Image (cartoon, rainbow, N blue to C red):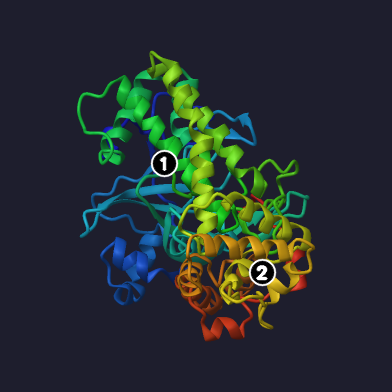
Amino acid sequence: MLLNLPIDSIIKSQAFIPRTVFSKVSPTSLKTRSKLAAVSTDALSRILDLDAESVADSELFVDFVSGNAVLSGSVPLAHRYGGHQFGSWANQLGDGRAVLLGEYINSHGEYWELQLKGSGKTPYSRAGDGRAVIRSSVREFLASEAMFHLGIPTSRAAALVVSDDPVYRDQFYDGHMKTERAAVVLRLAPSWFRIGSLEILARNGEHDELKQLVEFVLQHYFHAYITPKEYGQDDYIQLYGIIVNQTADLMAKWQSVGFAHGVCNTDNFSLLSITIDYGPFGFLDAYDPNFIPNSSDDEGRYAYKKQPEVGFFNLNKLREAMLPLIQSPAQLDAALEKYWNRFYRAYNREFMKKFGVIREHQDSQKLIAVFLDILTATGADFTASFRQLNLLLLAEDVVQIPTDAWALHKASRHKKWNYFTSLYRNIALDIRLSDSERINVINSTNPVYILRNWMAQQAIMTAEQDDFSEVNDLWQILRTPYTEQAYAEKRGFSRESPKWAKYLKVSCSS
């Protein structure tokens, strides 16, 4: 399908490559022996119809993920896109270290695009080397799979390989360059098109290509919503409205699991409203609305609490990109204006599920606000506090906190705690919500385990020593995040983060 779009044969890096959506490129082979560090058996079997055990022992598969072997019939491509980075237009960006290997329709009839991240220079690498290092690749592999099993729309990671090829990085942009090892992730998505895919065409007056790409997106990714035909104005506007709604829903889901992306540029926002391009992300430990996962984000533009606002900003840039195709811009404006109502409805729905409440109540917003105020003031752990609500028995005359509810004990020091429990109890009584029903919803909504930075860091440190057991153990745990696991409990993965964790820093460097 993708080969029907404008493709350039330019293979060398250029400052600007006009009137194209893709450029032909080949992955750059790793010079040293590659090692298969981790595989997602879920992704391999469920998405790619592969037997994970046989694949893990296959030299061809390792060469494929390493970029050393391109399958017959494959036409590797690098995508050209632009983007607003930290609020400013950056013009042409593109896949500077990612190569699209091809498309696959699996046994379930699902369409997936296979991409290597860290596979060498492309025409869009600019001054970069096109490589990725172990630390960022481990984080991408684990985060993609963790988010999927949390029920968040996301790209997937099928496999991770590492090598001894040297890569030179200034991790914190402080002048301390060091040598790291190269790694490559095989990642999958229904589409890698992003808001910046349209921006680059609109900004540079490439309106024929813009129309072609929008209609391609309509036909191939939104046919369940919009019947394939001779597309016109109404279809473009409907497409935009769908993306607005789905982006609002995604922002609500991010907030509900305490996820902060870290680099919410328009070139990192999917047109299909899935989470892509995992870099300096982070999950909340102690609840802090001002949490900034990216040490490069000096102004806190992409702080946790600002993500819904950034979603609106990015959708407005998508609106601007679609204007050359629209005769009645007011209809796009009207669609964008619905964003906040959609977001708040989704946000309230997601957060009330965290309380175990799936029915509407007039005090829902008050309950959410009071509890989050308590967590903010006390610094109680976000994930554990919500999960431990399953230990409260609201049917009792006095709501007691069990001894092992360590996060709630911290939260209960707040002066509003008794007011909160009274409000929570009254809501349950009003809607005739039993403790057993409420607890079942809590347990299926609030994870026991999330990918905390300190857990990822431990896996990275062992992987850099050629020990991939931590990566694979963590992947196994994050596959079933809602179920308590003996090994994970022994490792303290559901406990309060160690004190050293607050000193960890993650940057855009990878």
- Where does label 1 land, which residue? 78
Q: Is residue 438 above or below residue 30?
A: below
Residue drawn where x is 73% and y is 67% of the image:
411
Q: Earlier in the sequence, mark 2 or mark 1?
A: 1
Residue drawn where x is 52% and y is 52% of the image:
361
Nearest to the observer: residue 138 or residue 420: 420
Q: Is residue 418 left or right of residue 219?
A: right
Residue 246 numbered tag: none
Splitting the image into 4 quarters, where does residue 77 fall?
top left
Quarter of the image that includes the C terminus: bottom right
Q: Is residue 279 visible?
A: yes
Q: Amino acid at mark 1?
A: Ala
Q: Residues within 10 Å of mark 2 (few under 14, many from 20)?
A: some
Q: Is residue 377 left or right of residue 82?
A: right
Q: Residues within 10 Å of mark 1 (few under 14, many from 20)?
A: many
- Percent position of residue 386, x then y: 60, 66
Nearest to the observer: residue 52 or residue 414: 414
Residue 454 numbered tag: 2
Q: Is residue 9 above or below residue 161?
A: above
**Structural distance between the alpha carbons of marks 2 and 1:** 33 Å
Which residue sits furthest top?
327
Q: Amino acid at mark 2?
A: Trp
Nearest to the observer: residue 392 or residue 196: 392
Residue drawn where x is 36% and y is 64% of the image:
43
Nearest to the observer: residue 115 or residue 456: 456
Q: Is residue 75 above or below residue 55?
A: above
- Percent position of residue 50, x then y: 27, 68
- Percent position of residue 107, x then y: 20, 60
